[in-house]
Image (cartoon, coloured by chain):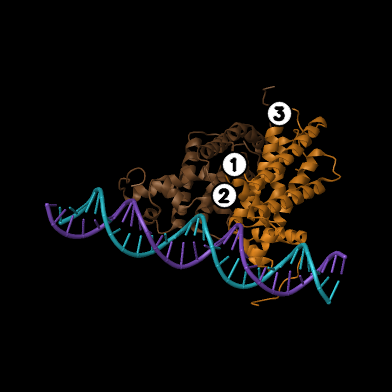
Chain colours: A brown, B orange, C cyan, D purple
DNA sequence: AAAGATAGTAATTGATTACTTTCTAAAATC
DNA sequence: GATTTTAGAAAGTAATCAATTACTATCTTT
């Protein structure tokens, strides 16, 4: 008995959830590539081998983590957009919601970037890929709605606008990871989105606040 | 004598350059975190231990690679901007030049992202950081020039515009890494930049192409 | 051409890592 | 309350990797 006491036995399901959360925690502090099964176990007050009662291998753990992230992120974004009618306002809410989520869970982008960066196609990578596609589809539909209600000009390049939307978020997150300063990013976001919005929205003579 | 012949002796400097290029090559195909000294040596037709004649440790290799990238990228961008007077046009040229460079050397963003993603501050990370800062300063100056010549509105948020510029490129590159399709990115870039440009430029009644 | 410096090989080392095996404690089931 | 099933500990294994060591071939210099 080295330190602490033996942890209460948990069911497989409970332990799997706890594992995912442990990884998300660790990813907020460390390079995901350096997260070892030993580190995960330690963070859970478990021995390393115990993890393999609940996951066949490490890859399966990562897959579970990516899935958790994808679901939570999409839920958060949809919740942020809820009840808003104007497509432009929905986009803004999604933008802010996305950034809020990332700021609250800095491990998420680190893991996603780390996973997607790899050359070979792992199951985890495929999951992340699918999420991005779903995101793009949602945005595209939103842009089309914006066009038909006049908020966006008909000649707007929808694909480019979608790419720029996602790219902008990824870039912002990347910059904040580099700077190690999530708070700064959250402050920048509304100002950055304002420029994006001006880039896609129907031209206005003036908004009157000057 | 297993395969091939013993390589010609090279000077320390020559071997160091060759090493950097080998790493850049490998990074285009593989996750940088997985590039081992053995893999580098193999790609150079050398034995693994030989590398340590020229570098004190692996970290020093990575430092050299990042430096190489930073220099080449900045040179390419400045070259692209050369001789252009309009600040907006310079920005567009830098944007395209940056993307061209990345498309030609896909290993570069992979290495930079991989390095910057890490939590702890390595010398390599500090180099990458410095390059980003230099980039931002250059852009900010450009934007100020744009304001004074009327191409950009005085009320434009310069910092946000800079952040968005860099973020957009990072995001685009990230997306192309994910998709594994650099060609697609190069096709998208002008259309994406057009939106950014509209977001920051002084309002125009119409360009006449309609 | 001899001597010294340098760049290479081949083999090894110590640390780390994902995964396994053996055994024990705790629940769950009967 | 006995039995069976499951979750965990503890120790071990094979593989991998950066770095080192002992030695050798190849340049350079005089």
Residue wearing tag 1: A177
Residue A169 x, y percent position in the rendering:
60, 41
Please state if B30 lies on the left or on the right of B80 as rendered: left
Residue A205 marker: 3
Q: Does residue A204 appear in this view?
A: yes
Residue at 66 percent across and 60 percent down: it is: B52
Within 10 Å of disc 3 (Cα), the crowding (few <14, some 14-19, many 20+) is: few
Residue B53 x, y percent position in the rendering:
69, 61
Q: Alpha carbon of mark 3 to alpha carbon of mark 2: how far? A: 40 Å
Q: Earlier in the sequence, mark 3 or mark 2?
A: 2
Circle 2 SS class = helix
Residue A113 marker: 2
Residue A125 x, y percent position in the rendering:
52, 55
| Chain of the residue displaying label 3 | A
Q: Alpha carbon of mark 1 to alpha carbon of mark 3: how far? A: 38 Å
| Chain of the residue displaying label 1 | A
Please state if A72 lies on the left or on the right of B173 as rendered: left
Please state if C14 lies on the left or on the right of A44 as rendered: right
Q: Earlier in the sequence, mark 2 or mark 1?
A: 2
Within 10 Å of disc 1 (Cα), the crowding (few <14, some 14-19, many 20+) is: many
């Amino acid at each position: 008995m080295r330190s602490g006491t033996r942890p209460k036995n948990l069911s497989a399901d409970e332990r799997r959830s706890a594992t995912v959360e442990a990884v998300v925690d660790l990813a907020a502090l460390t390079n995901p590539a350096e997260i070892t099964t030993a580190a995960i176990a330690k963070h859970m007050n478990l021995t390393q081998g115990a993890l393999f009662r609940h996951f066949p291998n490490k890859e399966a753990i990562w897959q579970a983590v990516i899935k958790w992230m994808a679901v939570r992120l999409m839920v958060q974004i949809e919740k942020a957009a809820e009840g808003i009618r104007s497509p432009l306002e929905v986009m803004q809410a999604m933008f802010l919601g996305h950034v809020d989520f990332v700021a609250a869970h800095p491990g998420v982008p680190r893991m996603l970037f780390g996973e997607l960066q790899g050359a070979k196609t792992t199951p985890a990578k495929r999951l992340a890929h699918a999420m991005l596609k779903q995101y793009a589809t949602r945005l595209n539909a939103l842009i089309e709605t914006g066009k038909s209600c006049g908020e966006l000009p008909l000649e707007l390049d929808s694909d480019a606008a979608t790419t720029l939307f996602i790219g902008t978020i990824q870039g912002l997150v990347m910059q904040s990871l580099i700077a190690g300063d999530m708070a700064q990013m959250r402050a920048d976001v509304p100002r950055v989105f304002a420029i994006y919005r001006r880039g896609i929205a129907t031209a206005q003579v003036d908004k009157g606040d000057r």
